Image (spheres, coloured by chain):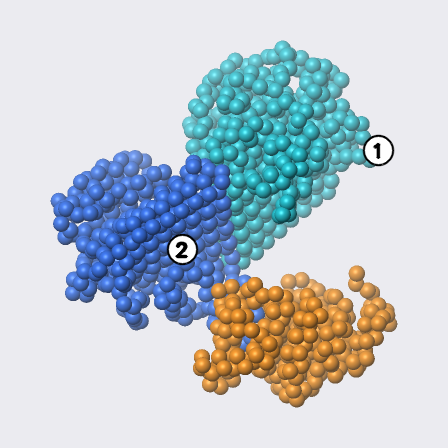
Amino acid sequence: MLEIKNMHVKLEEEDKAILKGVDLTIGSGEVHAIMGPNGSGKSTLSYVLSGRDGYEVTEGSAVLDGHDLLDMEPEERAAAGLFLAFQYPVEIPGVGNMTFLRTALNAQRKARGQEELSAGDFLKVVRAKAKALKIDADMLKRPVNVGFSGGEKKRNEILQMAILEPRMCILDETDSGLDVDAMRLVSDGVNALRDANRSFLVITHYQRLLDHIKPDVVHIMADGRILESGGPELALVVEKNGYADLLKKHGIAEVA
Amino acid sequence: MEQQIEVREGVDRETIETVQNMGSYKYGWETEIEMDYAPKGLSEDIVRLISAKNDEPEWMLDWRLKAYRRWITMTPPTWALLDIPKIDFQDIYYYARPKSMETRPTSLDEVDPKLLATYEKLGIPLKEQALLAGVTAPEGERQVAVDAVFDSVSVGTTFREKLAEAGVIFCSISEAIREHPELVKKYLGSVVPQSDNFYATLNSAVFSDGSFVYIPPGVKCPMELSTYFRINAENTGQFERTLIIADKGAYVSYLEGCTAPKRDTAQLHAAVVEIVIEEDSEVKYSTVQNWFPGDEDGKGGIYNFVTKRADCRGDRAKVMWTQVETGSAITWKYPSCLLRGNDSQGEFYSIAIANNMQQADTGTKMVHLGKNTRSRIVSKGISAGRAQNTYRGLVSIHPKATDSRNYTQCDSLLIGDKCGAHTVPYIEVKNNSSRVEHEATTSKVDDDQLFYCRTRGMDEEEAVALVVNGFCREVLQALPMEFAMEAQSLVAISLEGSVG
Amino acid sequence: MTIVEKASALDARLGTLLVPAGGFAARARRDALERLTAMGLPGRRDEYWRWTNPTDFAATEPKPAKALAEDEAPIFGTLDRLKIVFVDGVFDAAASDDLALEGIEIARLADAPDVNWASGFYGTLEAAGQVPVKRPFATLNTVAATDGVLIRVTGKPSKPVNVIYIHKSDRSDPILHHCIRLEPGAELTLLENGPAGARFNGVMEVDVADGARFHHVRAQGRDHDPRAITHIFARIGAEALFKSFTLTVNGVLTRNECVLSLIGDDAVAHVAGAALGDGAKDAFHHDDTVFITHDALRGESRQVFKKVLKHGAQGIFQGKILVKPGAQKTDGYQISQSLLMDDDCQFLGKPELEIYADDVKCSHGSTTGAIDETALFYLRSRGVPVEEARALLVLSFLADAIEEIEDEGLKDEIVSRLESWLARHRD
């Protein structure tokens, strides 16, 4: 489904390489996790895939279901089925969550040549999905992420995911700033959305999120490269020993 | 108490004790010393006389005369929110010099003991030792070099040899005009042009002394530099001129202090400070202004009409102005930053306190001309008694100053219902990659905080001093340590009699 | 400008005016002429005109301005309201509704009887509003206004009054002066819409008596070319409420002054504005100048001004809160924000506080910058195309100004105009 080949990325503003040749292939229905210390480039990968400004891809490619992602605008990537759950969801005062969701959904449907959803049909969809994710109606009425707690913001991301029904979901440090209960709620939401046609890339610093969202494959990333890949047991190794041993093994100086 | 009330940190017991042990204006005494005066009033002859007294070269006299001729065509500015009594510019002495300074002392040892004693009493011993406080410092502690200006002349400058070893020139401006004419010619009037404003033009014509600093490329000045201004003679104006040049990659921190005796008649102080900051260099300029503020009924005091400007000429140049304005009957002062170099930075931290009949109209201008320039303004104004206190500022982002930032925070505190607090910011943003944010608040001293302090045993005045010091904390922290201590106690003293 | 030049500029301007003779306002007009002669017209160097050039307002002739062919239904069109229509400043009886309505007396300046409630009122708030800053164009208006509405509200009329301006002639130069008094406890919603002429000078004096409530929503039309200088002078009594919102889209030069005086205890005054300007076709220069005086206890004032500027458009905000001695417990708030959509736009502002009472809470804030790139990316990552995302963020930016409109129906009317402006002005 998603195929990243030899991706090299540098910052646009300065001559600093962040990704130094990343290869990653995620099949349909698979859940992959990327773990790594701070500054390893894992969040950069999510930004580059979703088309954020400020990065320059100097080499390599990223293809989602045959679409060359790197040639597309952020909204085109979204319409092609890519979804990024932000580490820090953005607050938009004065714009209702419902308006936001409907604008996004209909924009994507339009881009895909589907008919736009009427206000009534949309409301039905949102209510059903919100209920399934245990999100109360009040959150839907408020402006986008304004006054939301950390947990509410992340659940709002998952609600968006449920409504927009992407093919490929990237979760960027979704566990950051969440307590155990909030993390469980968010993970339950994600698990409910897992199916054979949808893949996930879970980016995290800690293993604990992977207790709730069980990955098929775990990758360890550092210094802009994937050092090792393996099964869920690889995450447990990191959990037990930290990143130091792995970095040493691959000859990478530890970043303070 | 049910509610936890937060008293801001930043003041210690010492501040309060200092207040209790002090009279209201502790620098109000006078030095009895024989003086030479130029005749009262201003004319071309007086300008020539000042120039002659300083043994100036012809070009300097011409420069002064040009300014004088311009000045007589000008009128004082009226836009400030100040009620300035009419000043009779012909009823002022423009030059006053202690008789003992007639032959210029060649070293501090030759300076009149009376003058040395004056500075000793002000807490500024003109000996080459450490710290303003006058304590001999242990090895390695910071040292401060002082240029002492008494009425119209510089009495002496300490640590000159030590500074010279590092290549730093620190001397009176009259000496610099004689000894370093090439530097003075190049930079004098290049930041504050002669025609800048009424008071700056006046200063250009009649300035008698002041300090001169040159830090050569790549040099970090080995100690802090300071100038201490003392007005002593009656009916005399003080017109000093300071010129600081930080060449490429240089650094200096400069302190300025000022006091004057208590007198019934107001006195004029019209100074100009010019700072030139080249590429990659940094200047910090701190002022504790404690001119005599006049009495409770507004009699006497200094009219402090000052033009201060820093010009960040090179890329990555940095300037930081910090001022604590507690004195003067009237303050008219706007230390400003021209951010010409790309990535240059200007900062302005200010505490302005006006009590009794004092009036202050002060603030800053941040003129962003270079790309990616940054500025920050933090102004704390405190009004008490029947005083009027105005923050006036300009933030201007020019079309070519792309990706620039300004943040302004401007807070006013009112103590009592007879005073006024005013805010007049001008904001001009001419490109869209820059971001400008301005916030201002006005409020009274928080009754809950005062009450909380009083339940802990402080009297009302102590409590106010404590709370006000907390309000000013952000600016106090920007000051060099020894100045911060002095400023803290000054804040308390300045507010005496403001409650009850 | 020297005094002599000012006088001759004024003489020239006065020479082109047809000052209505007689009528109940004759005396007020004579007084105003005397005041105007003493102050003259503003020049470019006046501090109060630092950023807006008054020349076009002072000129003897208006610059020609083409009327826009309306391609959308007029705003407020679907609401039940009492219509009063002026075409290029001339009352259009046929297009207007019957002026009789329960709880309200409506007359016209041009044909009011000599004995009239407004005879001791016309020009008084304008005159009072000349201190401490001179506003000569308002005085000029008092001298020479040809018409206007006189509204006295005694009760709570069942529907809003809608003054509709229609601009047809390229060279129309209307001067209209409205007087509005709300008696104690009365309530009125006043709507204004449309460009009044090629050059418009409008004054509205509003006396909100104790306990009365005045709501004002204004949409200044879509025409590109017109110039307008408007003044609202209001006096707000004890426990009374004054709320005014203005939407400005286009017009090459607009200066809206609002001079409010809170004279009764517990008075509330809110004034808000949303200006969206695109300088691509013509210039866009919009100036909001507000002066609020607190002269009573526990007054509350709010100023919320938002500007969205494109293609060289210029936005000006001069806002002042003056708290007089004794006006304790004043709560004054002011915010001015500008969104610069491209690099050659400008925002120039002077948010002032002048405070002579200590137990007050006053603040102002101002921010200027471009659209938040992070928010833009967030929306795009959800599939919203970039132009649509920008429009959504502009609405988000304008939200707290629009929130100042209390009536939901009116709010929707304004939002729909914002949306259509945004749709028309995509890059």
Image position of A58 with respect to C43: above or below: below
**Which chain is the one coloured cyan?**
B
In which chain is the residue bearing label 2? Answer: C
From the viewer's perspective, tell me whether residue C212 is left or right of residue B169: left
Q: Colour of chain C?
A: blue
Q: Toward the viewer: C251 or B194?
A: C251
Other residues around mark 1 within 10 Å, as few (<14) / some (14–19) / many (≥20): few
* Amino acid found under the numbered disc labelled 2: Ala
Going 29% across and 44% down the picture, which residue do you hit? Answer: C125
Going 43% across and 45% down the picture, which residue do you hit? Answer: C298
Q: Secondary structure at mark 2?
A: strand
Q: Colour of chain A?
A: orange
Residue B139 — which label? 1
In which chain is the residue bearing label 1? Answer: B
* Amino acid found under the numbered disc labelled 1: Glu
Q: Quadrant of residue A84?
A: bottom right
How far from the left and from the top, in percent, is residue A179? 70, 68
Going 53% across and 73% down the picture, which residue do you hit? Answer: A137
Q: Secondary structure at mark 1?
A: loop
Residue A230 — which label? none
Task: Name the front one of labels 2 and 1.
Answer: 2
Residue corresponding to mark 2:
C272
Q: Is residue C56 visible?
A: no
Q: Toward the viewer: B496 or A7?
A: B496
